[in-house]
């Protein structure tokens, strides 16, 4: 288990929430598994209060289930919630790329995005668990940041964990698939640089719709993790 560190600007509740989310997305806490507040508090070096507050927040977005007299469990993958998370992401991110096509990118911003994508290409060829996933997140976060939509990003992030879980399950499944995802990022960036909002929108729709192609793989390879009749 990797050592977790509290960031300087985080409250104890935010720290607990971030780490628990990361453990759920990475499947260190697997769908359907039971969670112990006491064990998590000990691992994080916190009292149980901020961990309990984080659990309340995660229960609200239905990523964990709190069952009276039984305990706390990681929710199974629910594709209805994945669809809802994808809808929120699609709506907000389409607005972001439209704004970027209007205001343009500075040379520094463009350079940072290019560097990110080159690193993505490197980690497609040299797979490292979770790094490609992190760089993907970072790329999309930068788009929000450069459009001055950081609060919108935080709003999207609050529910995107449902979407992130299926993304994580399909990352590094096939090298060709991962390379296609990186190429889609390049297409979005190049359209933004050209200020071609229609092209950027089309590429983003294709990119964010990828999870649908992975649904069969996930349901067949992780059937015990997926809620039935979804």
Image (tube, grey):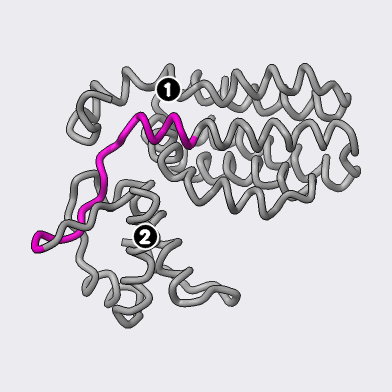
Q: Quadrant of the N terminus?
A: bottom left
Q: Secondary structure at mark 1?
A: loop
Q: Is residue 197 left or right of residue 158?
A: right
Task: Classify residue 72 by image quadrant.
Answer: bottom left
Q: Could you say where residue 157 lies in the image, as x and y percent from the top left?
A: 54, 49
**Residue count near mark 2 (Cα–Cα under 10 Å), binned few <14, some 14–19, many ≥20:** many
Q: Position of residue 75 (x, y in %)?
A: 26, 45
Q: Residue furthest bottom?
A: 47
Residue 219 is labelled as: none
User: How many numbered tags mark residues here?
Assistant: 2
Q: Position of residue 101 (x, y in %)?
A: 85, 31
Residue denoted by label 2: 20
Quarter-of-image position of residue 179: top right
Q: Are marks 1 and 2 in contact (CB under 8 Å)?
A: no
Q: Is residue 24 magenta?
A: no
Left or right: residue 129 compared with residue 52: right
Q: Tell me where residue 206 appears, x and y as whole percent.
A: 60, 18
Q: Quadrant of residue 190?
A: top right
* Residue 45 to residue 104: above or below: below
Image quarter where the C terminus lies is top left
Q: Residue at x 69, y 17 (%)?
A: 202
Q: Is residue 150 left or right of residue 104?
A: left
Sequence order check, earlier mark of 1 and 2: 2
Q: According to the image, label 1 marks what residue?
A: 174
Please tell me which residue is depicted at 33% across the width and 63% down the height of the picture: 55
- The verdict on residue 70 being magenta is yes
Label 1, label 2: how far apart the Cα atoms are: 27 Å
Q: What span is in magenta?
A: 69-85
């Amino acid at each position: 288990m990797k050592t977790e560190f509290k960031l300087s600007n985080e409250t104890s509740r935010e720290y607990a929430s971030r780490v628990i989310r990361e453990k759920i997305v990475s499947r260190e806490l697997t769908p359907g598994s039971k969670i112990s507040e006491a064990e998590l508090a000990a691992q994080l070096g916190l009292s149980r209060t901020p961990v309990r507050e984080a659990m309340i927040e995660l229960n609200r977005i239905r990523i964990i289930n709190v069952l009276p007299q039984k305990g706390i469990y990681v929710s199974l993958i629910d594709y209805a919630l994945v669809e809802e998370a994808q809808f929120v992401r699609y709506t907000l991110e389409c607005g972001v790329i439209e704004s970027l096509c209007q205001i343009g990118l500075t040379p520094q911003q463009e350079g940072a995005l290019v560097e990110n994508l080159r690193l993505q290409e490197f980690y497609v060829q040299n797979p490292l668990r979770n790094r490609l996933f992190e760089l993907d997140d970072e790329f999309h976060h930068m788009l929000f940041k450069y459009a001055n939509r950081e609060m919108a990003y935080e709003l999207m992030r609050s529910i995107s964990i449902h979407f992130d879980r299926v993304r994580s399950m399909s990352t590094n499944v096939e090298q060709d698939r991962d390379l296609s995802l990186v190429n889609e990022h390049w297409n979005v960036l190049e359209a933004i640089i050209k200020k071609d909002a229609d092209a950027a929108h089309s590429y983003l729709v294709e990119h964010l719709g990828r999870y649908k192609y992975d649904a069969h793989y996930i349901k067949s390879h992780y059937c015990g993790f997926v809620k039935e009749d979804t």
